Image (cartoon, grey):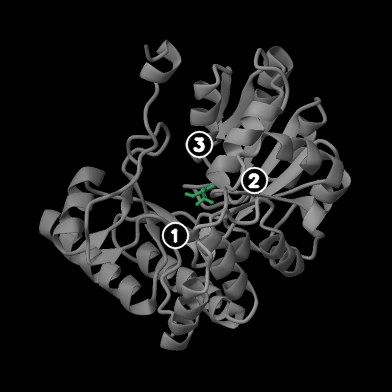
Amino acid sequence: MISKRISSLSPYKTETTPAKIKLSSNELSIDFPEELRKRIGEELARLPFNRYPDPEAYRLKEAIAQRFGVKPENIMLGNGSDELIYYLSIAIGEFDRGVFYPVPTFSMYGISAHVLGRKRIEVRLKEDFDIDLEKSLRKTREEKPALAYYAYPNNPTGNCFKEDSIRVIRSEGVFTVLDEAYYHYSGKTFLEEALSREDTVVLRTLSKIGMAGLRVGILIGKEELVKELNKIRLPFNITYPSQVIARLMLTEFYPFIEEAVKEVIRERERVFIELSSMEGIKAYPSEANFILFKSPIPAELLHEGLVRKGVLIRNFSYMEGLENCLRVSIGKPEENDAFLQALYEVLKEHT
Ligand code: PMP
């Protein structure tokens, strides 16, 4: 029989409606050149895929280590950072101590804790989407969570929390996970602290820089800590094709990614200005590759109207504190234009 813990769980939500323009999952919109696709095809054709891949994915780890300026020994890889979030929720502290995270935020922190029967200690963000330090400290002292998750920048609000609030909560004895999935768009990091402290790790991912389909998540921490965490990693969790393609992308073909990331950052500023100039829309500043905004008409109506025009974004109005809010990922300039035009038209139809 399925346990009560699982039957009471809400599954991970994502947008699956097909649409011509998909700006719903914070992927990187990028047209990879033919030359790269051909090269990948050749590499894959050579793969001995009847054999297990390297369980440590060492060559990929080397490429990642070089890109991020760390040592391979500081890295543990996951099948997406989602898997690493599970591992951290399993490995840090005893299960009778809870998991802390400010909300609204990325849903996997809560899901992983719930699955394991750990108490979820949630504190609402303030109006400006920053951490409510007073309340968080009170909760931390009352509940004594073993670990805390911070999406930095936060998904779906797009902001980076005040660093000192995170440090003050950590000083209560809380193991701290900085989920820097959107690091390439914020440039802000706790990497130095993850490399020097036993109570801090950083999570990164290749998903937001053009490789979501490869499922490669990255945990960075002190060597001794990584060694311990690695004990619970499922063997062969990074597939052969993912190891090979990701390594190619991070070495020879990295310039394409760098260019695309720069374009998204430029486009983010343009879309923010355009959104803010539309009547009734409130756009929230973002350090990620998406923008959260509040709609002047019911979010459901706006979402459906956009889908009818071939544009898919994410409706977050179901989350407490995000009434009538939707999140749009930043795509290529022509995709962003199509979104802005469709938005303008839907709003006009309803006002
Ligand atoms: N962390 C955050 C904050 C995210 O927004 C996401 C993706 N939506 C993830 C982790 C998961 O990333 P991955 O594809 O590496 O599992």
Residue that carries the numbered disc 3 in the rendered image:
108
Name the residue nearer the viewer: 35 or 53.
53
Residue 89 in sight? yes
Instruction: Answer whether labels 3 and 1 touch (C-beta < 8 Å).
Output: no
Whether ligand 1 has any atom under 8 Å from the Cβ at mark 2 is answered as: no
| Residue 209 against residue 141 in the figure, above or below | below
User: Looking at the picture, which amino acid does disc 3 mark?
Assistant: Met
Q: Position of residue 224 (x, y in %)?
A: 86, 41
Residue that carries the numbered disc 2 in the rendered image:
161
Left or right placement of residue 326 versus residue 36 in this view:
left
Instruction: Specify the quadrant of the image occupied by residue 291.
Output: bottom left
Spot the residue most to the right: 196
| Residue 187 against residue 139 in the figure, above or below | below
**Residue sitting at x 57%, y 68%:** 244
User: Looking at the picture, which amino acid does disc 2 mark?
Assistant: Phe
Q: Secondary structure at mark 2?
A: loop
Name the residue nearer the viewer: 104 or 203.
203
Which class describes the residues within 10 Å of circle 2: few (<14), some (14-19), or many (20+)?
Answer: some
Distance from Cα at disc 2 to Cα at disc 1? 29 Å
Instruction: Answer whether labels 2 and 3 touch (C-beta < 8 Å).
Output: no
Residue that carries the numbered disc 1 in the rendered image:
213
**Residue sitting at x 44%, y 58%:** 26
Specify the label residue 303 is tagged with: none
Name the residue nearer the viewer: 192 or 321.
192
Distance from Cα at disc 3 to Cα at disc 1? 18 Å
Whether ligand 1 has any atom under 8 Å from the Cβ at mark 3 is answered as: yes
**Residue sitting at x 60%, y 31%:** 101
